[in-house]
Amino acid sequence: MYTTHELLRFATAGSVDDGKSTLVGRLLHDTKSVLADQLDAVERVSRDRGFEGADLALLTDGLRAEREQGITIDVAYRYFSTATRSFILADTPGHVQYTRNMVTGASTAEAALILVDVRHGVVEQTRRHAAVAALLGVRHVALAVNKMDLIDFVEGPYLAALADFGDVATALGITEFTPIPDSALRGDNVVDRSDRTPWYDGPTMLEYLERVPVGVNPASLPFRMPVQYVNRPRTPSHPDFRGYSGRIASGVVRVGDPVVVGPSGIQTEVTGLEVLGVPVIEAFAPQSITVILRDELDINRGEVIAAVDEPPSVVRDLLGTICVVDDRPVNTGDRVLLRTGTATVPAIVRGIRDRLDLTTLARAQAEDSLCLNELGTIELRLAQPVAVDPYSRLRNSGSFILIEPQDGSTLAGGMIEV
């Protein structure tokens, strides 16, 4: 049985003024994850603004512009722990113009907390955030129905919001989600269970986060290791040593396993494995290892060592969905660099098939460009073949970024479809 460290990465998302930053602040405050000097600073700023108590939203809205406007602009990462597990929280913006930040925060998350204001229910941004979570393959979704204190904790509006989100989830292919009625301002059902919702018998927010399944069994996924470094120490004690170092992206590898090297397609056998210089007989994701192979092969950084029985696809023509994260649009005919795993290859944008409307999930003609925060499907022609997987199957080996070759800036993040 292979286990992963009890660490949960999760992202929060919600429309403007749904109380997301307050909810995150409440979660940090009530789990005793805030340092005394941080809390003192928040209380001081809150008093200066005329608040009776601490404005917990200030614990996450760290940029000056965020505090002045009372909104979240950038992705704020927070780290906290309980007796059960550790957490990395990505607090993402609610405004439509910061969709790229939502994509960034959710790209590595295993769970998503989507907030709605119980008075307004599901709105356009709720559908947008649910669509991004579904598109990025976030496996677990919780619906936080916030501001229950403003309707005196009446169950009816909560059930209405739950039904509306259920329709959205079904349309997006989200098979299940966990609804939680809460009041971030008062702390009801965030860390402590509220006696003002006797009609609710589900988990509190913290209970949900502590119980949601973390990771997957590495043995259930095919082995992939992008080669990061060819290890040739040439020391007197190891004059002929040749190993291939990298981080296992998925799966398990054992000494004696047959493997294939992509994109060349050459097959060989694992004769040795090392973790931090110590020989082992097996290793699994996400360990960093050195692989020793039976044959002396010309393998370079960017190639992938993979399971023979479930090899990656080797492609020069690639179809993928991208989110543009730069002010410069991605245009048909653009010459870019594509980076996937440890491979970086020149590419050309052969065409833009469509633009995705995150509100309706309808695909519309994108003409010849995709602009900042837009998502769409593009066709790429690569200068040389790469070994990849569909994102829906393997997130790590199915993702890529597009880079501007002139200055090295990131233009877009993408998910491979073929």
Image: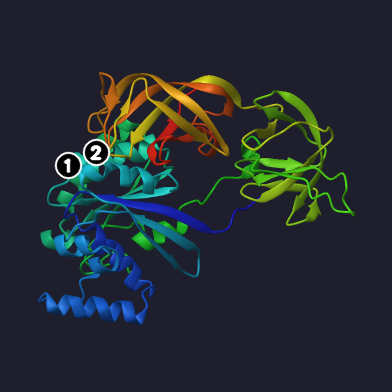
Nearest the eye: 204 or 236? 236
Nearest the eye: 110 or 378? 378
54 up-or-down from 169: above or below: below
* Residue 72 percent coordinates (x, y): 24, 56
The single residue placed furthest to the left in the displayed view is: 50
Q: Residues within 10 Å of mark 1 (few under 14, many from 20)?
A: some
* Residue 283 percent coordinates (x, y): 71, 48
* Residue 246 percent coordinates (x, y): 66, 45
Q: Residue type at mark 1: give it.
A: Val
For the rendered model, the colour scheme is: rainbow
- SS at mark 1 in the image: loop
Residue lying at 43% horizontally and 48% vertically, measured from the top left: 109
User: Could you give the CA–CA distance between mark 1 and mark 2, rounded to whole angstroms?
Assistant: 7 Å
- SS at mark 2 in the image: helix
Q: Residues within 10 Å of mark 2 (few under 14, many from 20)?
A: many
The residue under label 1 is 123
Q: Quadrant of residue 153?
A: bottom left
Q: Is residue 304 at all visible to an observer of this figure?
A: yes
Residue lying at 29% horizontally and 68% vertically, measured from the top left: 59
Residues at marks 1 and 2 touching, judged by CB atoms closer than 8 Å: yes
86 up-or-down from 296: above or below: below
Image side of residue 226 versus residue 354, left or right: right
Count of residue discs: 2
The residue under label 2 is 127
Q: Residue type at mark 2: give it.
A: Arg
Q: Quadrant of residue 216?
A: top right
* Residue 293 percent coordinates (x, y): 80, 37
Residue lying at 45% horizontally and 47% vertically, measured from the top left: 108
Image side of residue 253 versus residue 187, left or right: right
Q: Which mark is residue 26?
A: none
Image side of residue 199 versus residue 259, left or right: left
Q: Is residue 52 at all visible to an observer of this figure?
A: no
